[in-house]
Image (tube, grey):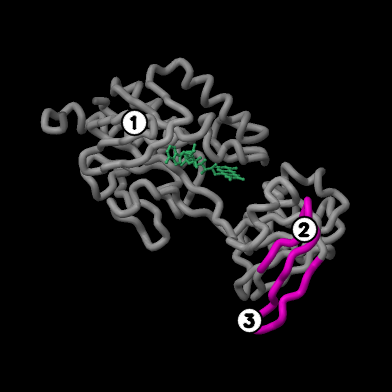
């Protein structure tokens, strides 16, 4: 029996564990991946918006986090597969056959990129699917590419790629791009970017590498093929809640609903970071939520009733 079990070791889970440790709670963190850090491994841009710490990218910031966390005393298990979670009993079953139990449980499972679900998307991973404009720019320099999405991330990536690619085709299913004005303004000045609104990418085509995409412009029109060497998909994210989906309150997009103390509707079950924050999913809000949850749990656990 642990005081606290935290599922997920991204910024939110690590911050929660760090605070729990400082507040004297017996804490275990379970992470499915080989390494801690979550989305920080996919941040290739400079991080200039985490107060007091600037970093060239997510890995550098993570290095600062882990240096600090290495001195803490909470338990951390990576490469741990959870097969079932009973939120009511705060009991966790692992693929190893082990069962764990805690007084408080924290969901810090973050989000994952939404998939388009078209033929070719999975097959061409690493063979023309661009993971990040910032990271893969040099790889696709001199080649035509296609970007799918209409929000900040899609447009920002299109702008980055347009610096090195002869043509960038931006495909967005909505009538208008959703990206912030600063990005859409820059887009107009980039003549190598073509924007197809009310359009969908229906197929990614290739042999041992992407060679083209199939695009359908407006409903009912015949799809056409466009020769490209790379495809980047940025159509948003979805919360990682498969383990607990049916057991607690979520919003219409699957984000865990919490109050100002990071409590879910299940007693002694908390949620922190992106999994419960559709409004401002950032590193600072994730670490801040961790601090809030830990303080609340510490207060609750000192009362006899909770133990
Ligand atoms: C390209 C990119 C650029 C970004 N740039 C910035 C920026 O400049 N500034 C900023 O503030 N934010 C930025 N962000 C957002 C920031 O990275 C996130 O807000 C932050 O990582 C959220 O932390 P989290 O711990 O809530 O979730 P995550 O980082 O998603 O971590 C969740 C963790 O939970 C684990 N997990 C999931 N399911 C399970 C399970 N079933 N069992 C065990 N473990 C599980 C995952 O493996 C992961 O390690 C960026 C994100 C991306 C993708």
The residue carrying pointer 3 sits among few (fewer than 14), some (14 to 19) or many (20 or more) residues within 10 Å by Cα, namely few
The residue carrying pointer 1 sits among few (fewer than 14), some (14 to 19) or many (20 or more) residues within 10 Å by Cα, namely few
Compute the Cα span from label 3 to label 1. Answer: 50 Å
Q: Are marks 2 and 1 in contact (CB under 8 Å)?
A: no
Range of the magenta residues?
202-226
The answer to which image quadrant residue 221 occupies is bottom right
In front of the other: 44 or 148: 148
Establish if 66 lies above or below 167: above
For numbered disc 1, what is the local secondary structure?
Answer: loop
The residue carrying pointer 2 sits among few (fewer than 14), some (14 to 19) or many (20 or more) residues within 10 Å by Cα, namely some
Q: Is residue 218 left or right of residue 213?
A: left
First in sequence: mark 3 or mark 1?
Answer: 1
User: Residue at coordinates 36% horizontally, 59% vertically from top-left?
Assistant: 251
Any atom of ligand 1 within 8 Å of the CB at mark 1? Answer: no
In the image, farthest residue toward the bottom: 220
In the image, farthest residue toward the left: 305
- Which of pointers 3 and 1 indicates the residue nearer the eye? 1
For numbered disc 3, what is the local secondary structure?
Answer: loop
Q: Is residue 258 left or right of residue 226?
A: left
Q: Are marks 3 and 1 in contact (CB under 8 Å)?
A: no
User: Residue at coordinates 48% horizontally, 54% vertically from top-left?
Assistant: 238
> Residue 48: which numbered mark, if any?
none
For numbered disc 2, what is the local secondary structure?
Answer: strand
Give the residue number, with chain letter if any, for mark 2: 206
Residue 122 shows in this picture? yes
Residue 206, how many percent across, how many down? 77, 58
> Residue 219: which numbered mark, if any?
3
| Magenta stretch, main secondary structure class | strand
The answer to which image quadrant residue 102 occupies is top left
Give the residue number, with chain letter if any, for mark 1: 97
Compute the Cα span from label 2 to label 1. Answer: 42 Å
């Amino acid at each position: 029996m642990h005081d606290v079990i935290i599922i997920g070791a991204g910024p939110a889970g690590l911050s929660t564990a760090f605070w729990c440790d400082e507040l004297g709670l017996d804490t275990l963190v379970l992470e499915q991946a080989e390494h801690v850090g979550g989305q920080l491994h996919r941040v290739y841009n400079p991080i200039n918006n985490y107060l007091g710490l600037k970093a060239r990218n997510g890995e550098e910031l993570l290095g600062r986090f882990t240096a600090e966390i290495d001195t803490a005393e909470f338990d951390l298990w990576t490469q741990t597969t959870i097969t079932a979670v009973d939120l009511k009993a705060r009991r966790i079953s692992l693929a190893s056959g082990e069962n764990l139990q805690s007084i408080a449980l924290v969901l810090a499972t973050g989000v994952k990129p939404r998939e388009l679900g078209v033929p070719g998307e999975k097959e061409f991973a690493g063979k023309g699917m661009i993971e990040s404009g910032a990271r893969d720019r040099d790889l696709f320099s001199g080649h035509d590419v296609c970007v799918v999405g209409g929000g900040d991330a899609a447009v920002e990536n299109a702008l980055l790629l347009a610096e090195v690619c002869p043509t960038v085709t931006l495909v967005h299913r909505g009538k208008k791009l959703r990206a912030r004005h600063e990005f859409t303004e820059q887009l107009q000045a980039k003549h190598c970017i073509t924007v197809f609104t009310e359009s969908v990418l229906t197929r990614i085509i290739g042999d041992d590498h992407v060679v083209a995409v199939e695009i359908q412009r407006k409903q009912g029109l015949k799809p056409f093929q466009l020769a490209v060497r790379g495809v980047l998909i940025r159509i948003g994210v979805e919360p990682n809640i498969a383990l607990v989906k049916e057991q607690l309150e979520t919003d219409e997009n699957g984000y865990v609903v919490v109050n100002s103390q990071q409590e879910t509707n299940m007693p002694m079950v908390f949620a922190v970071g992106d999994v419960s924050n559709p409004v401002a999913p950032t590193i600072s809000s994730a670490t801040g939520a961790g601090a809030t949850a830990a303080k609340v749990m510490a207060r609750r656990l000192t009362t006899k009733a909770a133990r």
